């Protein structure tokens, strides 16, 4: 079964709203993992965007889910490997959705979006919009734009960026991602407009090198315009 339908079955199960950050009981968890998991969940309850804590907890739930898939029969080893991978991804997806229940959480939304980008395009865009809205620094937006670019969706990246970018306050990496997305979408003139947004950043010393880098990228892209 594909990952997305499996996830939908999982999230339809009734769950208490108070479970965000709480350890899920299991009879098979290793004691060491259990103690570590409790500590990591406590850290993520305090800061749901703690990347190292999320990665460590994701590894625990991923390993637990993978180990739960039977793989004794050598004749079905390949299928079992695929099933373990799906189970592991599903576990991380569920973890991300759980932690995203915290209204301050944006990093878990990004991690779920990475898993959903191939199977659930609209859901991915929704998660990325929410992540961008929750992060005033612009980092979540920059990561979201790069994720969409890497998935071959520069036009969606442009739409997301234009709708959420605040050039004066957001980190300059957002401008980089918008410029590159515009170039990849075959819109060098639009890339030039996004490049100018760096003029609004509150600390111009920070963007000197980035501006020079992107000016070269835009100039190269403009050479591809017929008649130039």
Image (spheres, helix red, strand yellow):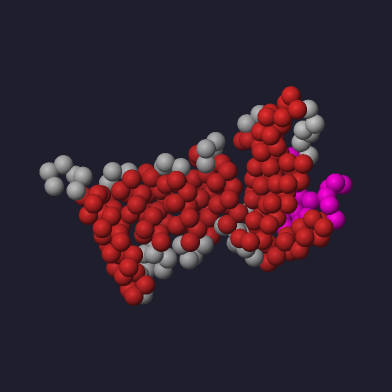
- Residue that appears at 41% across and 42% down: 153
Give the magenta range: 13-31
| Front position in the image: 111 or 83 | 83
Q: Position of residue 83 (x, y in %)?
A: 69, 33
Q: Quadrant of residue 48?
A: bottom right
Q: Position of residue 220 (x, y in %)?
A: 23, 52
Classify residue 100 as left or right of residue 184.
Answer: right
Classify residue 201 as left or right of residue 121.
Answer: left
What residue occupies the far front of the structure in this picture? 74
30 part of magenta stretch: yes
Q: Position of residue 141 (x, y in %)?
A: 46, 57
Q: Is residue 198 visible?
A: no
| Front position in the image: 72 or 107 | 72
Classify residue 173 as left or right of residue 218.
Answer: right
Q: Can residue 219 be seen in this view?
A: yes
Number of disc labels? 0
């Amino acid at each position: 079964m594909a990952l997305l339908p499996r996830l939908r079955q999982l999230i339809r199960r009734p769950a208490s709203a108070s479970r965000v950050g709480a350890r899920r009981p299991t009879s098979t968890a290793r004691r060491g993992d259990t103690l570590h998991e409790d500590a990591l969940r406590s850290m993520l309850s305090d800061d749901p965007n703690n990347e190292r804590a999320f990665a460590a907890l994701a590894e625990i739930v991923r390993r637990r889910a993978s180990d739960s898939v039977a793989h004794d029969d050598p004749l079905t080893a390949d299928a079992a490997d695929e099933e373990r991978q799906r189970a592991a991804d599903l576990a991380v997806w569920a973890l991300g959705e759980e932690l995203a229940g915290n209204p301050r959480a944006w990093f878990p939304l990004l991690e779920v979006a990475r898993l959903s980008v191939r199977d659930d395009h609209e859901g991915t865009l929704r998660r990325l919009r929410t992540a961008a809205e929750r992060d005033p620094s612009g980092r979540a937006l920059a990561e979201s734009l790069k994720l969409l670019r890497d998935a071959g969706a520069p036009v969606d990246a442009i739409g997301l960026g234009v709708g959420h970018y605040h050039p004066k306050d957001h980190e300059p990496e957002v401008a980089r991602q918008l410029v590159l997305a515009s170039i990849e979408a075959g819109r060098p003139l639009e890339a030039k407009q996004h490049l100018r947004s760096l003029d609004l950043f509150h600390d111009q010393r920070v963007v000197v090198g980035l501006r020079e880098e992107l000016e070269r990228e835009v100039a190269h892209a403009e050479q591809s315009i017929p008649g130039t």
